[in-house]
Amino acid sequence: MAGAGLTYRDWRERVPELLDAAVARWGLTLGEAYPQGAAGHVVRATLADGTPAALKLIFPHREAEHEADALAVWDGDGAVQLAAVDDEGWSMLIERCEPGELLAKSDPEAALDVLIALVPRLWRPVAEPFHTLADEVAVWLDEIPEAWELAERPIDRALLDETMETLAALSSSQGEQVLLHQDLHTDNVLAAEREPWLVIDPKPLLGEREFSVAPIVRDYALGHSRRDVVRRLDRLTSELALDRDRARWWTIGQTVAWMFESSHVDVHAETVLWLRAA
């Protein structure tokens, strides 16, 4: 998904150069780096006036293309505050979250309470420049069959075909389009000072509200059993007044689309089977 043929390895080799450019651009003093993420590099930074911040470099890929734009829309309401961004949108200064503990380390029931409170705060009726959920589904439908073959068919073909058919139907029958964080799980919420918990790492899309619960329902850090998964679906859809069946199938669809690049394919396949039976 990298732009202009840039591989992740190529990008990692450029990180020191990108850090130097950010220091020169914003007059930063850099501190300790945070643990390396899957598609980014984040380091503690201090502005010239002494303000603490975090410098985030993003590996250019489709899902994160408008991350800074989403943070600008939310403007610190439930999410980290954007302080500055470069012209291309792949290097940004954001609010530093301290103590910065992951929500994933909290009690699962308390963590779900936090997520249920955060989700609707991110729903914003905006338009440009974001990709749409319909656009994303079109990409998934093109990529899923080959990925399924390469992953040695972790779910049966009948379920794969049903999922693809349902994704197409959901995509063409959506409700109101709002800004969504399509990767809102417990590793993307941090303990902070300005608010108890703040959302990070948006992979923004414009789509219907029911889709927004998908990454939470399939978040195995909140418990991985049929009972856990179905209970999360029921709580989220009930308390956020969402259509349960559409949310269930959006979760199945995104889980199938994303599972092939995961190191936990079998775990995600179980989630899909439990939701299909739910």
Image (cartoon, rainbow, N blue to C red):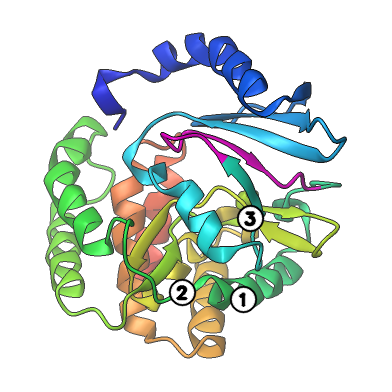
Asked if the stretch drawn in magenta spans residue 254, the answer is: no
What mark, if any, has residue 124 been given in the picture?
A: 2
Rendered location of residue 169, percent (x, y): 14, 73
Marks 2 and 1, how far apart at CA: 16 Å
- At label 2, the amino acid type is Arg
Q: Secondary structure at mark 1?
A: helix
Mark 1 or mark 3, earlier in chain: 1
- For residue 258, say whether it is visible: yes
Rendered location of residue 161, percent (x, y): 12, 58
Mark 1 residue crowding within 10 angstroms, few (<14) / some (14–19) / many (20+): some
Mark 3 residue crowding within 10 angstroms, few (<14) / some (14–19) / many (20+): many
| Prevailing SS of the magenta stretch | loop
* Residue at 21% across, 37% down: 147
Q: Quadrant of the C terminus?
A: bottom left
- For residue 278, say whether it is visible: no
Marks 1 and 3, how far apart at CA: 12 Å
What mark, if any, has residue 116 been given in the picture?
A: 1
Mark 2 residue crowding within 10 angstroms, few (<14) / some (14–19) / many (20+): some
Q: Quadrant of the N terminus?
A: top left
Residue closer to the observer: 56 or 207: 56
Q: Secondary structure at mark 2?
A: loop
Residue closer to the observer: 123 or 144: 123
Rendered location of residue 204, percent (x, y): 42, 56
In the image, taking residue 141 as reference, residue 38 lies left or right, namely: right
User: According to the image, label 3 marks what residue?
Assistant: 186
In the image, taking residue 66 as reference, residue 276 lies left or right, namely: left
Part of the protein shown in magenta: 85-97
* Residue at 86% across, 57% down: 193
Q: Secondary structure at mark 3?
A: helix
Considering only vertical position in the picture, is 141 above or below 278?
above
In the image, taking residue 48 as reference, residue 26 lies left or right, namely: left
What mark, if any, has residue 10 been given in the picture?
A: none
